[in-house]
Amino acid sequence: MNPNPTKKILLFGISLLLIIGAAGYWYFFMQGSSILGVTDTPTKPTFEPFGRTPTGSQPSQPNNEFTDPTSTSTTPFVKIPALRLLSNAPVGGYGASTTASTTAVRWIDRGRGNVYEARSNSLSITAISNTILPQTYSSLWNKNLTAFIGSLLESGAEKSTTIYTEIKPQITSITAATGTPAGAGTRAPFELKGKNLPANIITYAISPKKDQVFMLINESGIAVGYVATFAGTSITRIFDTPVTQLIAEWPEDNTIALTTNGTADQGGFLYFVNPKTGIWKKILGPVAGLSAKVSRDAKYVSASFSGNDRGIFMSIYTVATGNIIESPLRTLAEKCVWGSFYKNMLYCGVPTQRDTASYPDDWYKGKVSFADSLWQMNVTSEEVTSISSLLEQADRFIDAANLQLDDRDDFLFFINKTDLSLWSLDLVSSN
């Protein structure tokens, strides 16, 4: 008996639809959605922010000039912790720089002198140079993180040496036939090239634009102040003083701040000096145990001092009016930093408990150390806010020192004075 023709046509139609559907599924899904400009197979990012590579592969060489990553990068999203340990090894100073899309920080390994970098949008830590520059215990960096002024104290030496150093591409070999670097098309590793700055530098500070340096030099028992380019050239003498125990900072274009070395047994002073005229102005003093930090517009001073009970106290001084308010943050001013963008904001490492001691002397000498929390204070409204309980987040005691902020006040950087490790805190996520 012949099958029903209508039934045969119906079965044929169903089979045809199944074949077309399977083909469509394979074309649009199994091959990847290339018709939309994206494939299922992960593609290599067009820019790797100094990322690490598997063992045996060649690492990408970073560009020494700090620039933004390209907007076409397909780097997978990585969760960056708010509080981040950047270097567990002791560091000899650091610098931070911000662009439209990321913040970079570079630092010097205190032991060997290697330079490392981290970025806010990557968990990678990259070695920038392997030049041996041991015993670098402090450094101040230019805006693009391509040069720094550092202090070295060699083993057995009584006095430190101050140097200017640039981070330059290193040509490792030359192809004889062409006279070009071997491995053309890739960046060679970087090396440090520099020179010694004048001897007997007492203190130095970099300008707000990070393109000039102030140097206070001991010349036959007289402290002489000079302003120069960041590289230490075009030196201009601006003043001299018999006071040689001074600490310098340069918060605002027309203001260099000089604070006498703090000690609980003597009254300390803070002076402002105009770098163009060399004219001095006394701001504070005498204050026992004075330690001071000046805001980026030179309108405010956070000043800590020793109390009669051998404790720590801090006040906020308004330069224009002479008004003084007591800060609820009882800490050393040297454990604070003023906002770069929000100039009325003060960020401090505040001890959770304080031992009775001679401050700031015993802290300088390492006889006492602190377990800090991080706080911010709006000196206009006098409002204070806790931004990090470091012990809970880091699971270790942190005595915060050498605090710095990026240009947008997005990240707070600091060194743990106890072990000289380097840390960063994402202030945006913390708030």
Image: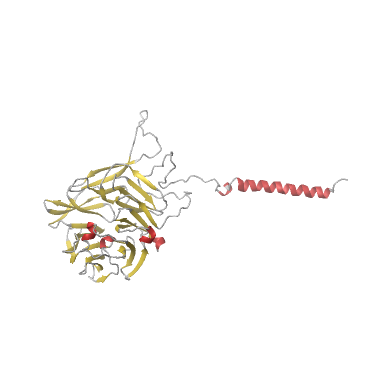
Residue at the extreme left of the image, as rendered: 220
Quadrant (top left/top right/bottom left/bottom right) for the N terminus = top right
Q: Whole-percent x and y of residue 366? A: 24, 57
Q: Which of 69 and 362 is in front in this view?
A: 362
Quick check: 147 left or right of 57? left
Q: Which residue is drawn at 69% across and 47% down?
A: 20
Tell me where residue 133 sits by quadrant.
top left
**Residue 56's spot in the image, x, y percent?**
43, 38
Figure disc tally: 0
Q: Quadrant location of residue 206?
A: bottom left
In the picture, residue 265 is in which quadrant? bottom left
Find residue 370 and report its horizontal and vertical position in percent.
29, 61
Residue 285 placement (x, y as % from top left)? 18, 66
Query: Does the rendering let one see residue 252?
Result: no
- The quarter of the picture where the C terminus appears is bottom left
Tell me, yes or no, if residue 287 can be seen here: yes
Residue nearer the viewer, 67 or 345: 345
Q: Residue at x 28, y 46 (%)?
A: 111
User: Most extreme residue toward the right, as rendered?
Assistant: 1
Type of colouring: secondary structure
